[in-house]
Image: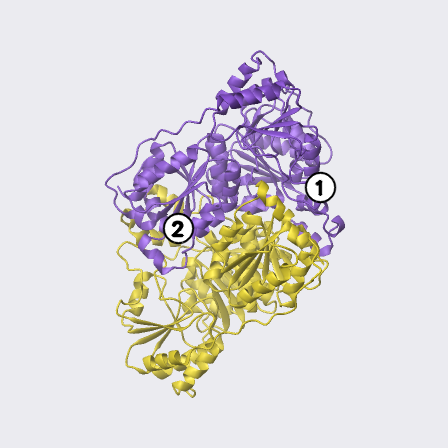
Chain colours: A purple, B yellow
């Protein structure tokens, strides 16, 4: 067994059985080993930004990490933006980055670069395997780190990959369990919630499934606290039957308004909320300066047990929390825009769908419109680095082949990782992609105004950098070029019909929804 | 004048008057300033990998740097692979990376990341501007660094950009001149060349224009030295009238064979040649262990004066070097393949064209086929990081609007930065793109064999990772989707006709050349 086989076998033994990849020469022994060791599903992506976003989407839905296989520093660089999103969303990934053979590094061959530094910026853990004898243990450590919702990056020199490893693979390791939340923290939060302070429970960077949502809902209902999610949750159960949870507004001004009377902010899996960007004259922190903030649970603490204990402590076991009713709107008529598209989606959304939302300004009506739709999961852009949606939908579909994935994607963001469509076609993934084609970086038009630059009004050069018309992008042609069927909708009726067909037909389909900007 | 205006004005005063960009909110004051300060041409790219490659192609042809404007760490990450190529090719670029306002960084907002570490991996110089009062001086320093053929990265916090700078802009600075080559080095190399040692002059990482080529040719002819370029030259004058220069083979085995009798290796702008990758049992260094290596000139030394002095020292002033004759082949007939495509190109290539070669295996016949074509410039992939060709062609066309750019591109590499096509359409650049569509990562099939993995024969899983058919990529559809006219050729006759029309028609055009793999 060589190093590569030992690595792959160890990953498989630990349940890591999907690898998103675009390999190169330095990874060829890993690639060869895939036919020697059973059980690793390999998914080829035409660009590394696709595969890192796919690994993120996979992890959020599979609740376990995928591996990636990347070609040296530049391959890792291409993957960086979506690894950033994964890191910010506490979504685990195990990156295997091929490197030159150890003895070859000294020669500074063309593809040599400082992989450690690049990896450090997007990983919780970075390690270089020094020999084939180490690789299985190193892989196990990466599994351990990923088990803590971390991005773990293992650098694999080519000679470590091809050298013989008599020790073979490691078997499944025991993942470190999540730390119990200390008793005194429970006491403190219970007394905070029981006080007459105006409390907001703010959740982010962790999955809010039905069970967690329900318990939070009982706590909120019993104590009068408000329940709110971060602007961009990693994964959240939504729709009929789920607990009513506010969403912190994206706009700093609106978030400040939402939190203005808050006296105690109880944080779950996130830090105190801050403005996405800085703006002249706008504070960075959203909570009032007098507000008391309290960390209920971090990422490596046992939130589920904590919630059960807290409900008990508060005597909220029998409380019925506020939940969303099922309330399906009629199909829209007339013009197609972000509002009518959201309404059509609320009408047609199948039960148990996965929604990936990277629709930017066009997505603004979605959160409200889908609150009373059939139950579904929502994944959002946790790190702000665009080009997340199409790849994440790809990974989510591989994690959950029995569920419909609906990717709601802004035109500008779509073009960042448009190569995802090819992997959707190759793997025949059950994904409906809706491109909101408004021919603008509309969010930047809005942000230009908010920064106050040039009195908030772009001149002609600035305006040309915010527009992506001229030429207009034809997403039907691009999708067809990568083997994905596609249609264009310019009216609500056409969109309704195309969305219904796409939802009822297995495999990938793209709708190029030509919409005006929301503002 | 605010910081952004002061920065832009300083760049313009120093001749840096093109900016390739995809900005975000933190860059909005820079974007606004473009309408306040005259003279900066801004080119929007739909993905940062396009803009960094465009800045590289621009610099190679304009012989001066462009600026880029990037959105925080993830934007820089997206640009990384082509910045790597620029760094390896000693192609100057001035990156402006927007960051959060200085006071906002402490809050770790979603888009916060370690920009310094990412930048460090692909830059010769990284600096963060601390105040609007510093920015003009900082920009001047970036200009100085880029003047030394370096990648200079200036991090621009949003508040530095928007704050008032009463000092205004800096005027043009005096670039440090290249150091003269010491007299004793001239003595040494002259005596080496005059000795009976078998000498090879190996040039890389620097432009070899007609003048330099001619002088090297005189030196080689007068002394019996062989003249050779690195595998992937940054920029090289080629075709009829240029000096005959060998090219070091890509394959390590062939490079070792080429250099096997060499007793003295005279290096120009590069280190001792090494194998692109390591392979079990193949040495890393290409020159024989007994070979004496000698550095003639580094990147910051005055090569042009050195060459004139060396020719004089060797009494080679009157020597007629071997030059390429004009020898245009007939147009090919029959099947379309890499050989016939190269022949058609040699027939049709217009004088003074710029060829960007990222055709991978399909490009192998090009170097020989174009040796006797009309005079042209050749740009190649200096850092091995694919996705270079389409962006570099974009930048080259902006640098040289009066010259035809011909981009020879492998299908797999094309998909890395396919968004380039949109910028070609928007700017109506005079580029002919030929996609060699063989539906394989053919170079990886070859490399799989060379690494000896699994006896050199990929199993079914490995084979699936080396093939990019299923679905086949339709580059005509993709190009049309981004506003670029395109045609498909499956015979030599069709390719000849399409190439002739494309060369004679201004503006971008893509030919989807369906070819078999070369092996």
Q: In the rendered view, does A151 fall on the left or right side of A132?
A: right
User: How many C-alpha atoms fall within 10 Å of the one at disc 2: few (<14), some, or many (≥20)?
Assistant: many
Under tag 2, what secondary structure? Answer: loop
Asked whether A39 or A198 is in front, the reply is: A198
Instruction: For mark 1, name the chain.
Output: A
Q: Which image quarter holds the C terminus of chain A?
A: top right
Asked whether B510 or A208 is in front, the reply is: A208
Whichever of labels 2 and 1 marks the residue nearer the N terminus, that label is: 2
The answer to whether residue B439 is seen in the rendering is no
Dividing the picture into quadrants, the one containing residue A176 is top left
Asked whether A181 or A228 is in front, the reply is: A181
Dividing the picture into quadrants, the one containing residue A107 is bottom left
State whether discs 2 and 1 lie on one chain.
Answer: yes
* C-beta proximity under 8 Å, tags 2 and 1: no
- Return the x and y of residue B304 as percentages of the image width and height: 48, 78
User: Mark 2 and mark 1: span between their CA atoms?
Assistant: 42 Å
Q: Which mark is residue B42?
A: none
Q: In the rendered view, does A356 fall on the left or right side of A96?
A: right
Which residue lies at the image location 32% right of the left edge and 65% below the top edge?
A: B255
Q: Is residue A360 above or below residue A304?
A: below
**Label 2, on which residue?**
A24
- Return the x and y of residue A347 as percentages of the image width and height: 64, 26
Dividing the picture into quadrants, the one containing residue B108 is top right
Q: Which mark is residue A516?
A: 1
Tell me the mark number nearer the camera, choosing from 2 and 1: 2
Q: Is residue B275 above or below residue A289?
A: below
- Return the x and y of residue B356 as percentages of the image width and height: 50, 63
Which residue lies at the image location 38% right of the left edge and 85% below the top edge?
A: B314
């Amino acid at each position: 067994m060589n190093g590569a086989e030992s690595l792959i076998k160890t990953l498989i033994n630990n349940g890591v059985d999907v690898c998103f990849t675009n390999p190169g020469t330095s990874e060829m022994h890993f690639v060869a080993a895939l036919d020697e060791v059973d059980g690793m599903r390999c998914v080829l992506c035409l660009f590394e930004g696709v595969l890192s976003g796919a690994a993120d989407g996979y992890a959020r839905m599979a609740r376990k990490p995928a591996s990636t296989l990347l070609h040296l520093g530049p391959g890792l660089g291409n993957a960086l933006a979506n690894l950033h999103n994964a890191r910010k969303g506490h979504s685990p990934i195990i990156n295997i980055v091929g490197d030159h053979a150890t003895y070859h590094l000294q020669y500074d061959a063309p593809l040599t670069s400082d992989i450690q530094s690049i990896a450090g910026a997007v990983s919780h853990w970075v390690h270089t395997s020094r020999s084939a004898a180490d690789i299985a243990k190193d892989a196990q450590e990466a599994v351990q780190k990923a088990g803590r919702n971390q991005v773990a990056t293992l650098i694999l020199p080519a000679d470590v990959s091809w050298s013989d490893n008599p020790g073979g693979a490691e078997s499944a390791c025991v993942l470190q369990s999540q730390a119990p939340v200390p008793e005194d923290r429970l006491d403190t939060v219970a007394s905070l919630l029981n006080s007459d302070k105006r409390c907001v429970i703010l959740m982010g960077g962790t999955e809010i499934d039905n069970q967690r949502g329900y318990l939070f809902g009982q706590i909120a209902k019993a104590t009068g606290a408000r329940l709110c999610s971060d602007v961009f949750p990693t994964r959240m159960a939504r729709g009929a039957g789920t607990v009513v949870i506010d969403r912190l507004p994206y706009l700093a001004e609106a978030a400040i308004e939402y939190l203005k009377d808050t006296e105690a902010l109880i944080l779950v899996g996130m830090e105190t909320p801050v403005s996405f960007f800085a703006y002249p004259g706008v504070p960075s922190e959203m909570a009032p300066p007098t507000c008391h903030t309290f960390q209920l649970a971090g990422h490596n603490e046992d939130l589920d047990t904590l919630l059960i204990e807290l409900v008990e402590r508060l005597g909220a076991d029998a409380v019925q929390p506020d939940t969303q009713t099922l309330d399906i709107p009629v199909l829209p008529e007339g013009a197609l825009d972000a509002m009518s598209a959201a309404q059509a989606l609320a009408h047609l959304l199948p039960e148990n769908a996965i929604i990936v939302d990277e629709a930017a300004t066009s997505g603004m009506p979605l959160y409200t419109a889908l609150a009373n739709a059939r139950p579904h999961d929502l994944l959002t852009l946790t790190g702000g680095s665009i080009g997340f949606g199409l790849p994440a939908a790809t990974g989510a579909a591989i994690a959950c082949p029995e569920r419909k994935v609906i990717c709601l994607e802004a035109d500008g963001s779509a073009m960042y990782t448009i190569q995802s469509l090819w992997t959707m076609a190759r793997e025949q993934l059950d994904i409906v992609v809706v491109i909101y084609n408004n021919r603008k970086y509309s969010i930047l038009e809005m942000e230009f105004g908010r920064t106050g630059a040039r009195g908030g009004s772009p001149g002609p050069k600035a305006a040309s950098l915010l527009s992506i018309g001229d030429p207009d992008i034809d997403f039907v042609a691009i999708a067809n070029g990568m083997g994905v069927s596609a249609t264009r909708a310019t009216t609500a009726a056409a969109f309704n019909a195309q969305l219904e067909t796409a939802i009822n037909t297995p495999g990938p389909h793209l709708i190029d929804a030509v919409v005006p900007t929301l503002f």
